[in-house]
Amino acid sequence: MILIAPLEDTGTVFSYSRLSEASGLTVDIFTPDSLDVIGFTYDARLSIIGPLGAFKKNHLIRLGLKSSGNIATNPGVESVQTQTTDGLDIKLFKYPIGLRGAAEIETNQDFSIIDATGKADGVIAIPFLKWPLLQWLNLIRISRVIFPPILYGGYTYVYNVKDVLPSDEGDDPYHRINGGFKWNIPFTSSVDLSVDYSANYILSPNENEDNEYIDFVDTRCKIYTDKTRKIATIVGYQKGALPPEYIHVELILAGFEVTMF
């Protein structure tokens, strides 16, 4: 994921820290409305290379390691999306556009499905959508960092290393066209709203099978309980499916979020 923001704007503070995805670890712990399992969402990043001096002031390149995913105390219960993505990526951007290349491993929780992927994405920020939010924060006299929403899209090559077949052999490689929309909205001094929509158009390697469109939406409301905004109560809604297993879920969730660093 790439988040892009201008360096400065009247009445609002911007920085490259969120834009460049500096090292950090965030963990969400929640339970769905079915109350049959406890779910965990995590996002860990290790920045290897930050801004490079060869680039101009408003350019940025970053190389890093990332691990993110959703796991559950009982992966056999299909009320929580369970999947992990681990890999190495490189990002290059100049506001408001960016590029990302990545080599990643996608797995389900019990590692019965393992896909090796190569990804290339383009991203563009939508600056004008932040102005109504700016006016709202000015009206309630709150100073918050604001990032415009982003649209992204690209191509993914998928090599199936392991599947749930008795022979323990993978399927033929296939291709995905992917895209999405992300926006984190600072609503008040202690409340954030977020929308994360992702879509995958799967191009079937088998001529006898149709291509398939699969999407996933994750909306959250975060209420921070400390001034550093590292601990929050969360409520949210999820619907859809994610690679590599593509198990469809629909749930209302509640829990809390902790940002380690």
Image: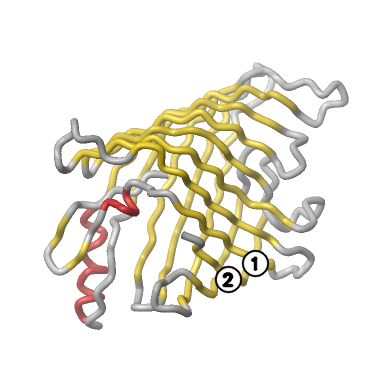
| Residue 30 numbered tag | 1
Q: Position of residue 164 (x, y in %)?
A: 80, 31
Q: Nearer the viewer, residue 194 or 260?
A: 260
Amino acid at the residue labelled 1: Phe
- Other residues around mark 2 within 10 Å, as few (<14) / some (14–19) / many (≥20): some
Query: Residue 64 sits in which quadrant?
Result: top left
**Residue at the location (22% across, 69% down)?**
134
Task: Examine the rendered structure and indicate whether residue 236 appears above or below residue 119.
Answer: below
Q: Secondary structure at mark 1?
A: strand
Above or below: residue 174 compared with residue 24: above
Q: Nearer the viewer, residue 107 or 23?
A: 23
Q: Is residue 179 left or right of residue 213?
A: left
Quadrant position of residue 151:
top left
10 Å crowding of disc 1: few (<14), some (14-19), many (20+): many
Q: How many marks?
A: 2
Disc 1 to disc 2: CB gap under 8 Å: yes
Please state, as top left, top right, bottom left or bottom right, where the N terminus lies in the image.
top left
What percent of the width, then of the height, locates residue 36? Answer: 79, 66
225, above or below 204, in the image? below
The image position of residue 242, as x and y in percent, is 61, 44
Amino acid of disc 2: Phe
Q: Could you say which is closer to the camera, residue 64 or residue 109? A: 64
The mark found on residue 256 in the picture is: 2
Residue ranking furthest to the left: 10
Q: Secondary structure at mark 2?
A: strand
Q: If you read the primary sequence from the N terminus, does the residue marked by circle 1 or circle 2 appear first?
A: 1
Q: Residue at x 65, y 59 (%)?
A: 40
In the displayed structure, does residue 10 sit left or right of residue 109? left
Q: Is residue 74 left or right of residue 176?
A: right
